[in-house]
Image (tube, rainbow, N blue to C red):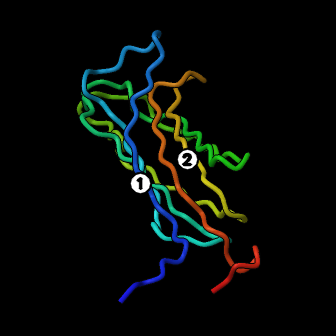
Amino acid sequence: MRRKHVGVAVLVAATLQVVPSHAQKPKGTSLSIRVSPQIVFSPARVVATAELKDVDDASGEFYCPALEWEWGDGTTSEASFDCEPFEAGRSEIKKRYISDHTYQSAGRYRVLLRLKRQGKVILASSATVQVRPGVRDGFGY
């Protein structure tokens, strides 16, 4: 029996280390992003989860960064936090960041997260999400 495949969204998760030459990051630190759900039709709300891995907790490099999410559809979300000064051994470095976004129309979108300190990118990562035509696009099933 042959099955007919209906258009579905495909999630591609990626880990990308982008570090400007002026930044001194500890070796091995990485940022990965997952976007879910994996199958999505427009309009679609997705949740992006980023994880910081292999962080030197004694270093304040990744303590309390500003966040800039770029959703690939011309919109961005930014967040900054009012944190106490870093104290080695006492301050907690957040290693998971979560945000959500709603795509109104079909397309392939690159979700990018930039961790910033004093306006400069210290680490970034991206993932791609495919949004298929949905009810609003006249292709509802």
Question: Outermost residue toward the top?
Answer: 22
In the image, residue 34 sits, relative to residue 40, either above or below, namely above
- Given residues 84 and 24, the one toward you in this image is 24
Q: What element carries label 2?
A: strand
Q: Is mark 1 on a helix, strand or loop?
A: strand
Residue found 75% across the figure and 73% down from its top: 137
Q: Residues within 10 Å of mark 1 (few under 14, many from 20)?
A: many
Q: Name the residue under label 2.
A: 111
Quarter that holds the N terminus = bottom left
In the image, residue 116 sits, relative to residue 48, either above or below, namely above
- Given residues 118 and 88, the one toward you in this image is 118
- Please state if 12 lies on the left or on the right of 137 as rendered: left
To which quarter of the image does residue 133 belong?
Answer: bottom right
Q: Which of marks 1 and 2 is nearer the N terminus?
A: 1
Residue 104 location in percent, x, y?
A: 72, 65
- Given residues 8 and 129, the one toward you in this image is 8
Q: Name the residue under label 1.
A: 34
Residue 125 location in percent, x, y?
A: 45, 37
